[in-house]
Amino acid sequence: MFKPIFLAALLAPGIAFAAGGGATTPPKPTETTQKCKGGQIWDNAAKKCKSPEHSQLSPDTLFAAAREFAYAEQYVNAQRALAAMPDQDEARVQTYMGFTTRKMGDVAAGMAYYKAALARDPGDILARSYIGQALVEGGDTVGAYRQLMAIRDYGGAGTWAEASLRSAIETGQTYSY
């Protein structure tokens, strides 16, 4: 069992991969979650909020908004941003659809999204971490451990994906982002 201070030291550098992407920390609130209403996304160029479905926002802007919404536990808004992305089969879209769907209570559908992400990219360590965390929540630590080993096999040792799943297996506590 990890000591709390050691575990905190392990997790801090790895927060980089929280809720996807390669950012180094959880997303900071922007105008998207601070000013915009109803799932609209801040458009820096226009300096106003826009509907994700009717905007010319880039896929990366839409994904960043989805990540910010997910961190703020605005899962429906995160899904709207993801739905506006042009490549719905992209692994990061499938991973986040899985995460938000699972967090809204439909674990089976969430797992189907994660599996679609892995079909597109077997090395998607974030999808594997989220699958493992769902397995921990369901009491399947053996299955979660298999995902942890796969994360390491795909070069994910030392990442947030690996550290958060390892922590979940050790403590039974999973992450909400």
Image (cartoon, rainbow, N blue to C red):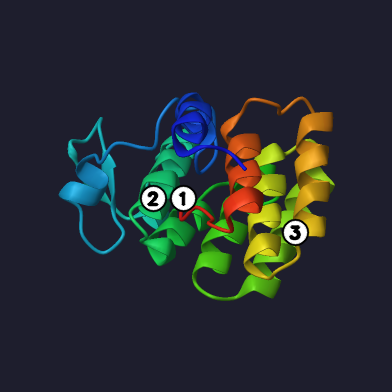
Measured along the vertical axis of the image, is residue 20 above or below residue 39? Answer: above
Residue 152 location, x and y as percent?
A: 78, 31
Q: Which quadrant: the N terminus?
A: top right
Residue 122 showing in the rendered view: no
Towards the viewer: 147 or 88: 147
Q: Are marks 1 and 3 in contact (CB under 8 Å)?
A: no
The residue that mark 2 highlights is 71
Q: Badge 1, how many Cα within 10 Å: few under 14, some, many 20+?
A: some
Residue 106 placement: quadrant: bottom right
Tell me which residue sits at (37%, 52%) in the image.
Answer: 69
* Mark 2–mark 1 distance (CA, rounded to whole Å): 5 Å
Where residue 13 is drawn, which disc sits there?
none
* Element class at badge 1: loop
Picture residue at 48% right of the left edge, 60% below the top: 79
The residue under label 3 is which amino acid type? Thr
> Is 63 left or right of 110, judged from the image as shown?
left
Q: Position of residue 113 (x, y in %)?
A: 70, 60
Q: Do the residues under discs 2 and 1 have CB atoms within 8 angstroms?
A: yes
Tell me which numbered mark, 2 or 1, is placed earlier along the sequence: 2
What crowding class fits label 2: few (fewer than 14 Cα within 10 Å), some (14-19), or many (20 or more)?
Answer: many
Horizontal side of 166 relative to 23 (left or right) equals: right
Q: Earlier in the sequence, mark 3 or mark 2?
A: 2
How far apart marks 1 and 3 lie (CA) works out to 20 Å
Q: Which residue is mark 1?
A: 177
Q: Amino acid at mark 1?
A: Tyr
Residue at 75%, 54% (x, y): give it.
Answer: 144
Q: Residues within 10 Å of mark 3 (few under 14, many from 20)?
A: some
Q: Which residue is denoted by mark 3 in the rendering?
A: 141
Give the secondary structure at mark 2.
Answer: helix
Residue under the point 47% across and 26% down: 9
